[in-house]
Image (tube, rainbow, N blue to C red):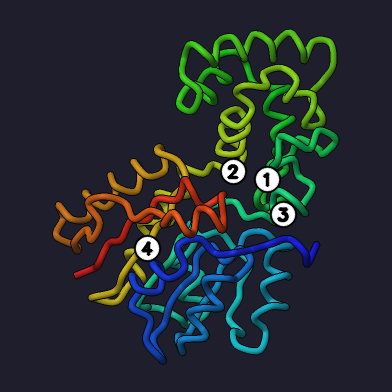
Amino acid sequence: MESNVSHEPVLLSEVLEALNVKRGKKYIDATLGAGGHSEAILNRGGKVLGIEADSQMLKFSEERLVNNCPTLVRGKFENIVAISKSQNFAPVDGVLMDLGISNFHYESLKRGFSFKKGTEPLDLRLAPADTDVTAAMLLNALSEKQLESLFEKIIGIHKSRGIIKKILRARKEKPFAIVSDLQNLARQESAEIFLALRIAVNSEFEALESGVRGALEVLNSGGVLVVISFHSLEDKLVMKLFREFEQKELGAISTQSPIVPTEVEIERNPKSRSALMRIFKKI
C-alpha cells in the first residue's frame, strides 16, 4: 500500500469531543480504515477495539497502531455485538462509525473506487474476502427492473432510466469489466452511478442499520454513539434509527442538526466537505 497517500481522519477533534475520551475507558472504532481516529483515541489514553472489513486496510492499521493497540480485528461492523463479545471488550463507553471511503480506496486498492481510473477492474467491494459479487457482475446480470431498483434512490427515476437503457445496450456488445466500460456511458452522472453500485455491492444500507442497532447494544449506560455519514440517504437512515431509539426511551439524540467540517478542515481536506456527524447518548 502506498505510504504517500494521505489519510487524514475527518472531523477528528469533533469526534474526540463527542466521545469524551478518557484514560482507561473502552471505545470501538467500528470502521477502522487507516486508523487515524483510533490513533487519536489511543493517544488520549483510551482503549480501542478496531474493526475493519478490508484485510489490506487492516494490515496498514496494524502496522500503524501495533505498539498501542493489540485489539484489531478483521470483520464487518454489522457484527459488532459478536466481535466485541469474542474479544471480551463489551460493554464500551463509545462507538465510532465513520462511513467514508478513504483515500487508500481511491488511490491504492485498485478496485475501481475512482471513476477516473478507467483501467481498474469494476469491482467496488469493500471486503473481497466476504463476497464474490462485483459491480461488473451486477451490471452484466441484473434485469432492467433490478437495475431500476439499484439506481433510482441515488440517481432518480428519470435519470436512471436513460442510464439503464445504455447499460442494457452496451452489455449486449461487450460485458462490463473495467471502470471505463461504465464511465464512458454517462460521464455527468459518474459519481452517482458509482455510489449506487458501491452501495449495492456491499449491501451498505442493510449493514448500516444492523451496525447502528448493534452499537447501541454494546454501549454502557451513558455511552455515546458517533456516526459520520457522507450522503443524505445514509444520514436519513441514521436519524430514523436515532429517533426510534429516542422514542423507545433508550437514550437521547445530541445532534438535531448534523455537525459538519469547518471551512479550515474542508480547505485542508476537500473530501471532508460532505461529512455529516450525528451523536446519540444511551441512557
Q: Inspect the image, locate mark 3, and give the three-letter code of the amino acid beneath it.
A: Ala
Mark 3 Cα shell of 10 Å, populated few (<14), some (14-19), many (≥20): few
Could you tell me if the residues under marks 1 and 2 are in contact, i.e. CB atoms within 8 Å? Answer: yes
Q: Which mark is residue 129?
A: 3
Q: Which residue is mark 1?
A: 125
> For the residues carrying marks 4 and 3, which lies nearer the camera in this image?
4
Nearer the observer: mark 1 or 3; the answer is 1
Q: Residue 82, relative to residue 43: is it above or below?
A: above
Q: Position of residue 274 (x, y in %)?
A: 47, 45
Q: Mark 2 and mark 4: span between their CA atoms? A: 21 Å
Q: Nearer the viewer, mark 2 or mark 4?
A: 4
Mark 2 nearby-residue class (10 Å; few <14, some 14–19, many ≥20): many
Q: Amino acid at mark 1?
A: Arg
**CA distance separating discs 4 and 3:** 27 Å
Could you tell me if the residues under marks 4 and 3 are in contact, i.e. CB atoms within 8 Å?
no
- Give the residue pinned by disc 2: 202
Q: Earlier in the sequence, mark 4 or mark 1?
A: 1
Q: CA distance from mark 3 to mark 2?
A: 12 Å
Q: Which mark lies nearer to you, 4 or 1?
A: 4
Identify whether 239 is placed above or below 19: above
